[in-house]
Structures are given as structure tokens and as C-alpha cells.
Amino acid sequence: MISNSIYAFLFLIFQSTITYLEYSINERFILRLSFIQAQRCIVNFYLGLYLACRDFIISFIWTCLIEVRFRSLELLSKNNNIFKKEIYAMKIFRRTKIMQILLLLILMISVIALTACGGGNDGENAEKPTIVFGDAGWDSFTFHNEVARMIVEKGYGYPTEVTMGSSAMTFTALRQGDIDVYMETWIENFGDAFTDAADSGEVVRLSSTFPDSEQGLYVLTFVIEGDKERGIEPMAPTLKSVKDLPRYWEIFKDEEDPTKGRLYGAIPGWVADEDLRTKFKTYGLDETFNYFSPGSDAGLASSIVGAYERGEAWVGYYWNPTWIMGKYDMTLLTEEPFSEIKWENGRASAWPPVDVAVVVHKDFLQKAPDVVEFLKKYTTTSELTSQALSFMEQNNVDPKEAAIWFLKEHEDIWTEWVPAEVAEKVKAEL
């Protein structure tokens, strides 16, 4: 009776201790996991190791208690045969527990080996820092971000994030190092801010996002060439330059003022609006045209769409790349080639060439040198970008889906930017 009471007491203490330890360990382990800033392989390793060790220790303690009970019964059975059946049952139970311990030992070793080896690729990624892309909000910027991010994530294994904001805010963040990569930097638009950042070494230009960006006065091409499929005859067959516009003002007649034509201006608040108003007077267009402010980029785009659908003449400011350029055939009217002297004297030349570049923070050169090599080769064209933006507009999809479409449709282009093994990883994801 005494030995049974002691055994029951020990068993109660053991069971209570195990319950407390398991609750305590589980609670602390889960809390610990919430603070681990590691990849899945590290978490899996410790989780597997913890579970295997826990079960092994519990089974081992159980076996020790069974062994104590077994030895006690053997001593008692020398003087009393009533324990012989219980001893026989204990022998079987003890053998079962020993086998369980051996199996758990094998399982524990297997878990450690598999989690350590199986997480090899994730272990590599665990060492890779997060790359932060800046996004000033317009569609072409976001599109190029998504193309680059997909290649960086799927091909190179880096995690990425995006910081959004105005041009001024995001470029300041780039200078400070809070943003790593700026995929569409309109360098001329930043003026002295970019010059100061580049001269001080805060930012580094890697490549041209698209080297052929244009802005100026456009007409719908059918105004010059006609459109046989739609039954539209040429309206101004000799219209080639801005200086030719006064001869054709009547085909662009302003409904609100039929004595003059209507020329759609740039977006209010843009530098281009100020430049175009100066050109308007320098070229004498104010004598035959009214300068019409569209109010917004959406208003300007809708005026083009409406004129195209009605088959009417349209002339005004626009730029490339945009979805409008990807969807509609438009012709840029020529001006005198850019001259700094003429430009400063009444904007009497074409707009200065705009350098649209991939720019990174100086520390990014060491942070991800393999991605730097990729970005040095990253380049597209205004036409390709406009096609992607047009795909977004016509199919009502977001920039990420447009990026997937681009990577599928133009494999011959982007595979030249990266090593073969990186390209294969990206293609596998597509």
C-alpha cells in the first residue's frame, strides 16, 4: 500500500509538472516566434526540434517511472504472487515505451536533418535585405516598378517593398536612403535637386528607363493622313510643323469661339503649361487659336478619345509614354531642334530632351550588387511603355498584371538584362 501511494504521489507530481512545463514552454516558444525576424527555415528548425525533444523527454520520464514501478513490483512479488500478472503487463508496457523512445530519437534526428537541409534555399534568402522601391504615383512609374520587382523577387530572391508619395517626397526619401531604387526619374523635372544629389554622391544613375521620351504639340494622325477604314479623308495633308498650324486653324475650330481654332494646353500647375503658354505667343498662335486649359490629365485624355471617336480634328499638348499613345495613332508636330539659346529666348525651339533614368541610393551599390548589375541593363522604349499602359487601360488591369503581360510578351527583351539562371527562375513563376 505504501509503495502504491508513493507511486501515485510521484505520478501526480510528474503529470502536474509536465502539464505546467508544456504550457509554459509552448507559451514562451510562441511568444519567441512572434519576435523572430528570420525566414521559414529557421522557424521550422526550432519548431521541429522543440516538438521532437518535448516528446522524447516526456516518454523518457514516463519510462523511468515505469521502471521504478516495475522494480518495486518485482520486490513485492517475491513474497506475494498477486503482483505476477501486473508484472507481466508491466514488462509489455515497458518494452513498448522503450520502442517509443527509440522511434522518437530517430524522429528527432530526422526532423533536425530535414528542416536544416530542406530550408537551404530559404536560408540564403534570409540573409538578403529588403529592397525598397519609390513610387510617385503615375502609371508608367508603377508599371516599371512591378516589372523590376518581379525580376528581383522571383529571380534574385530579394524581398521588396514600395514607398509611395509625391515626387518631391519620394525623391527626398531616396536621397536620405529610405528608398533604394527609383525606376522612373525624370531628371530634368527635378532640376537642381537632382544635380545636387548626384554631385554630392547621394544618388547614382544606372540606366535609361526609356531614352526616347517626347513632349510637345500633337495631332491625331488621321488629320494628316486620313483613315480609309473609317472613311476619313486627310484634313491637313501638308501639316508637319507647329508653324503650319495657322494655315489650318479652321479645321480645329473652337465651338465656343468660331473665329479661332482651339489648341488644348498642358495641365495647370505643370511647368509644361508655363512653357507652352510662352511658345503660344512666341509662335504667334494666339492670333488664330485659343489656348484651352483641360483642367487635368484625365480631361486632356478624354478630349483626345472623344475627338478620335467622332473623327474630328484635335491639336494640343501631350507626352510619351502614356496609354493614349499606346492606343491611338498620333503625330508630333516638329519644331526647331532644341537650342538652349532659343529656349531661353521665348521657348522658340523643341522641348529639351528629357532623361528618364533608373536611379539608386549610393548605399544600394553594396546592399545588392547583383541587382545593381541587372538595373544597369534595364532599358525599354516609350513605345513599349505606352503599349503596356494601353494594355492596362483596355483590359482594366493593374500595373502588376501589365508587368506579367510584358514579361510574357517581351521575353526577348528582359532576358538580356539578367543571367540565364535568373531568367529561368522568373519564367518558371510566369
Image (cartoon, grey):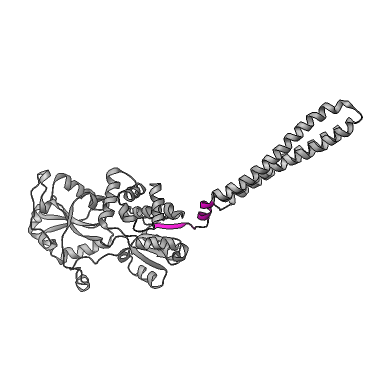
Q: Residue 112: where, in percent of width, then height?
A: 62, 48
Q: Quadrant of the N terminus?
A: top right
Question: Can you tell which quarter of the image residue 293 is in?
Answer: bottom left
Which residue sits furthest right?
Answer: 79
Q: Residue 19: where, in percent of width, then height?
A: 72, 39
- Note whether 30 is above or below 10 in the view shown: below
Closer to the camera, 396 or 209? 209
Question: Can you tell which quarter of the image residue 315 is in?
Answer: bottom left
Closer to the camera, 282 or 69? 69
| Residue lying at 36% horizontally and 65% vertically, measured from the top left | 206
Q: Residue 350: where, in percent of width, then height?
A: 19, 66
Is residue 128 magenta-colored?
Answer: yes
Count of marks placed on residues: 0
| Residue lying at 14% horizontally and 65% vertically, measured from the top left | 283
Query: Can residue 258 be seen here?
Result: no
Question: Can you tell which quarter of the image residue 136 is in?
Answer: bottom left
| Residue lying at 20% horizontally and 50% vertically, measured from the top left | 328
Q: Which residues are magenta?
A: 120-134
Relative placement, left or right, of 18 versus 421 is: right
Relative placement, left or right, of 119 versus 148 is: right
Relative placement, left or right, of 179 versus 86 is: left
Q: Residue 343: where, in percent of width, then height?
A: 21, 70
Is residue 141 magenta-colored?
Answer: no
Closer to the camera, 189 or 425? 425
Query: Can residue 390 be seen here?
Result: yes
- Note whether 425 is above or below 273 in the view shown: above
- Note whether 339 is above or below 383 in the view shown: below
